[in-house]
Image (spheres, rainbow, N blue to C red):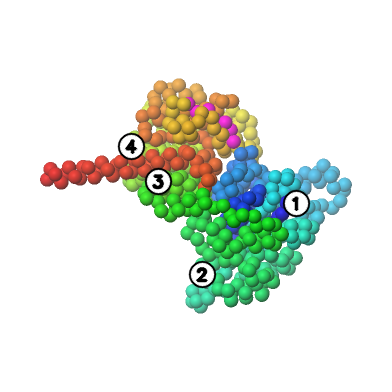
Amino acid sequence: MTKYIFVTGGVTSSLGKGILSASLAKLLQARGYRVTIQKFDPYINVDPGTMNPYEHGECYVTDDGAETDLDLGHYERFLNIPTSQANNVTTGQVYQTVINRERNGDYLGKTVQVIPHITDEIKRRMMLLGGTGNYDIVVSEIGGTVGDIESLPYIEALRQVKWDLGNSNCLVIHLTLIPYLKAAGELKTKPTQHSVRELLEIGVQPDILVCRTEKTLSLALKKKIALFCNVSANAVIESIDAKSIYSVPLLMMKEKLDRIALSKLKLPLRDEPQMDSWLEFLKSLKNSKKVVKIGLVGKYVELQDAYKSINESFIHGGALNECKVSVHAIHSETINEKNFEQKLKSVDAILVAPGFGERGIQGKILACEYARVNKIPFLGICLGMQCAVIEYARNVLKLKNAHSTEIKPNSLHPVIDLMEEQKKVVKKGGTMRLGAYPCDINPESKAFEVYKQTSILERHRHRFEFNNKYLEKFEEAGLIASGINPENKLVEIVELRDHPFYIGVQYHPELKSTVDNPHPLFVQFIKAAMEHKYSFEKVETQISKEDIILN
């Protein structure tokens, strides 16, 4: 029988329920259990696809084309297994399903209510992955914090599930905060006590408390928390602030979280977690021999979560290269004709990030030009690739009015145009080209050197594409299409022949990079940045030696 672990949060948001869930799942997986994680989000949007990145961070896309919460990225990066639409549930999806059933007459004229109809649908989705028979343990993260009005149906559904399954088949972990008051010089347990009381009022008794803290919890403090929150002392787990999210699984292993969870679920411990590759990754991460500075040019750089997967991919690729990647975020709106050299001259490589809309587009185009002209390693993702195409059309092909019809619908040279199947689309939610699609790679290309294979699958999220009417002109001038979709001939990858590393991709490689399998495009991009930086420094050193000899 599949066992279920639910992770709730209290006191404040952003405590790290997603990282905790992923860390515990990683430890259980490392003991040989088949584990998956799902996220329940209490917002009424059907999915985060229509949300501004400033609202909810990046929108993570799965292989099956689901637009999901960014926490699913953490799940995949930690477990190294793909997620799907079933791994992300929102209140919008739940209500939409219930309302559709009501319209179909499925409730036989009954009054449709939050209890039991909404909670029954939540429970059905909570059990869905476990019912496949593919998993021994399903970890479910409940979004928001206990006490939020939006979260109440989920906590009530959790109460019912725990009652139905029994304590040995269903475990509740509550993540809370133990704040440190500097003026008093004390850690305070009252917020945790109040948070647990909120849960108890709804009828849910947490089995394990994980306490976020910036100071070590003493045994006496753990016993106090256990006494007031009605849990055993060994079930009060310290989660001290870590420099890297990738240290959290090891910290949780040290606190015996996986052992306690398995004990309460009456599951055998099996072997100790096999974390050797994880330790090697952390070792490489902490003992990097070199440093490169990569300019991340985007329009949402004020919010780190807007480019979460890109930043994590830099960490994965950097560790494999034994190189620390220092990300220099540059707002594309601040780049103009007068300052772009000053803004970009200090970086060793440039990544132009994805995005939508006109704001900051000219700054991205200027960044593409600077990287191309100055032979600086360049990677353009989605809109970043499209900006590279627009820049090349204007400055090399001399098509001065070249643009994307997303920005300029009546452009004389629409080198980027709306995809044919998108022209009849009216609704915005879930209607882009989404999910994994195949791409055939030219074996005589830089892209082939990166992937070392001629056929790949990558995830997409876009409406606009390279206009193939201009393909011949581009290739004659030196910007080649090195990756093509075999079904519709969509240009997936462009690259410059006479450049050390200048690649633009229509897809999102950052969505498939994990700790165990860093994405090759990021690995090689960082390697190119290292070669650019250290060969340049070598040349400078040689010149200075010559100056000394001559003088």
Q: Which residues are magenta?
A: 436-442
Spatial CA distance of label 1 from label 3 is 48 Å
> What mark, if any, has residue 1 been given in the picture?
1
Q: Secondary structure at mark 2?
A: loop
**How far from the left and from the top, in percent, is residue 44?**
67, 51
Image marks 1 and 3: residues in contact by CB distance under 8 Å: no
Q: Nearer the viewer, mark 3 or mark 2?
A: 2
Left or right: residue 215 compared with residue 368 = right
Badge 4 amino acid: Asn
Residue linked to disc 3: 294
Residue reaching furthest to the bottom: 184
- Disc 4 designates what residue? 374
The image position of residue 41, as x and y in percent, is 65, 53
Question: Circle 2 is placed at which residue position?
Answer: 215
Disc 3 to disc 4, C-alpha distance: 15 Å
Q: Amino acid at mark 2?
A: Lys
- Looking at marks 1 and 4 on the same chain, the residue that comes earlier in the sequence is marked by 1
Q: Nearer the viewer, mark 3 or mark 4?
A: 3
